[in-house]
Image (spheres, helix red, strand yellow):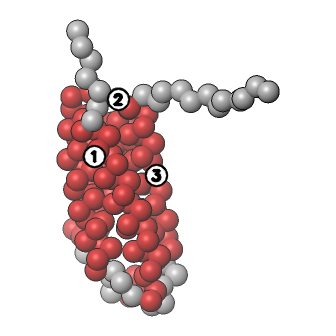
Amino acid sequence: MKKTILEDIKINIKVKLASLWTSVTFLYIYGDYFELYVPTKVSGIINGNSMLDTPIKLFLASLLLAIPSLMICFSILLKPQLNKWLNIVFGLFFTAIMLLIAATSFSEWRVFYVFYAILESMLTAIIVWTAYNWTKQIN
């Protein structure tokens, strides 16, 4: 009897990195969306009682969260050397941030947030590992 083997093509590292950043970005969006269901969150936003209660804080948060979204296209478009180091630097940065958020967000209503933070930190750690181990071309 013939044994069927599923095809497994080699995926370009740039595509791998872009897909990892895409997953991270979706998890950020879902985490922030689901946080709106935490009691008093929406009323706090409406009343101006939130972490992002000034134009500067809102801009800085926007700047921070633009990075993972931009890393999706940068992972495809940039030259390998710059691409590798941006993935390592931003991967380490976001891994640290998400581990800090996971460690400081424990509460009954934020278990989902800790879950997302752990997933995000795992994915960004994989980004760092993948970029660090970028295969070198021998000329």
Whichever of callouts 3 and 1 sits on the residue coming sooner in the sequence is 3
Residue beneath the point at 53% across and 27% down:
9
In the picture, measured across the screen, residue 74 lies left or right of residue 109, that is: left
Whichever of callouts 1 and 2 sits on the residue coming sooner in the sequence is 2
Distance in Å between CA atoms under marks 1 and 2? 18 Å
Residue 50 x/y as whole percent: 33, 82
Checking the image for residue 128, the label placed there is: 1
Q: Residue 65 is drawn in which quadrant?
A: bottom left
Checking the image for residue 77, the label placed there is: 2
Q: Residue 70 is drawn in which quadrant?
A: top left
Residue 67 x/y as whole percent: 30, 50
Q: Residue furthest right?
A: 1
Q: Are marks 1 and 2 in contact (CB under 8 Å)?
A: no
Amino acid at pointer 1: Val
Question: Of circles 3 and 1, which is in front?
Answer: 1
For mark 1, give the secondary structure.
helix
Residue placed most toward the observer, 51 or 3: 3
Amino acid at pointer 3: Ser
Residue beneath the point at 23% across and 62% down:
96
Task: Say which residue label 3 marks.
Answer: 23
| Dot 2 crowding, Cα within 10 Å, few <14, some 14–19, many 20+ | few
Question: Of circles 3 and 2, which is in front?
Answer: 3
Distance in Å between CA atoms under marks 3 and 1? 15 Å
Whichever of callouts 3 and 2 sits on the residue coming sooner in the sequence is 3
Residue 11 x/y as whole percent: 47, 30
